[in-house]
Amino acid sequence: MRKKLSLLIAMSLSAIMLFTGCASKGNSEGSKSPAAKAETFKVGLEAGYAPFNWTQMDASNGAVKIEGSSEYAGGYDVEIAKKIAEGLGKQLVIVKTEWDGLVPALASGKIDAIIAGMSPTAERKEAIDFSDNYYKSDLVMVVKKGGKYDGATSIQDFKGAKVTAQLNTFHYSVIDQIKGVNKQPAMDNFPAMRVALESGMIDGYVSERPEGVSASAANDKFKMAEFKEKFTTSDDDTAIAVGVAKGSELTAKINKILSDVSEQDRTSIMDAAIKNQPAAK
């Protein structure tokens, strides 16, 4: 009887200890969850605007895994995001997001920052805050090599040309500066514009110089046209900065980190991004 009683007591104690241990483990894991979340730096980008950002299938050349995907993101923006995440002491998480969804994703807290070749225009500044600039570029036109507009030296050389740019960007609005241009509907992304250019649907698309260099380097059928008579733009239009939520404490921290990245380093990072971009499809 004593042995049976001892056995019952031992079994009861074991059950209590097991239950207590599981509960403690559960509480411990639960307490780690918010902390783990706080240690990430979630960056939104479209991963389709080489050399600023693109999608690839492996981690080569420093690419970062895209959240919820087997794909990776690489490019200039990703390298800048890595430096910022390191400076913040957080783990970088890339959230692939359509261009039109970037600002809403920031507003909803789905991402912590936009690092996507985005210009700090006056209109965008009404919705979100921006860091100091981390790149500045000129506008160009990407055309077909050997085509009618191959030798263009002025934006006015595109009179009658079928020209487009990315939807909801200032690139699309500057097309109106070309007299007599055949302005085409805006397109969602740069891969779509490259396909349209190669197929002859359009004669050219407005872009920034790094993307123009990237497009012509990736596809020998393309050429970047630079102009003596350029598009009229503001400094904010051609600058690129990190987008953060209104009143975010990240702004000052990101500015401090960016101030430590020299112009020489920024140029080297862009040169490497152009060299490492995937071939155009």
Image: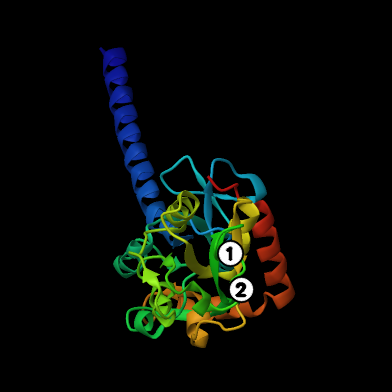
Mark 2 and mark 1 in contact? Answer it, CB < 8 Å. yes
Secondary structure beneath dot 2 equals: loop
Question: Any mark on residue 212, and which?
Answer: 1
Question: Any mark on residue 226, and which?
Answer: 2
Three-letter amino acid code at disc 1?
Answer: Gly
Three-letter amino acid code at disc 2?
Answer: Glu
Relative image position of residue 182 (x, y in whole percent): 37, 69
**Viewer can see residue 76:** no
In this picture, is 10 found above or below 110?
A: above
**Viewer can see residue 69:** yes
Please report the residue visible at 60 percent of the width from the left and 50 percent of the height from the top.
219
Please report the residue visible at 42 percent of the width from the left and 74 percent of the height from the top.
244
Relative image position of residue 106 (x, y in whole percent): 35, 67
In this picture, is 177 found above or below 171?
A: below
The front one of 277 and 81 is 277
Task: Name the colour scheme.
Answer: rainbow
Please report the residue visible at 58 percent of the width from the left and 77 percent of the height from the top.
138
Relative image position of residue 158 (x, y in whole percent): 48, 72
Q: Quadrant of residue 121?
A: bottom left
Query: Quick one: label 2 or label 1, which is nearer the N terminus?
Result: 1
Query: Neighbour class for label 2 at 10 Å: few (<14), some, many (≥20)?
Result: some
Mark 2 to mark 1: distance in Å?
9 Å
Relative image position of residue 24 (x, y in whole percent): 36, 44
Left or right: where does residue 104 sit relative to residue 262? Answer: left
The front one of 76 and 18 is 76
The front one of 100 and 139 is 139
Please report the residue visible at 58 percent of the width from the left and 41 percent of the height from the top.
58
Left or right: where does residue 272 sit relative to residue 192? Answer: right
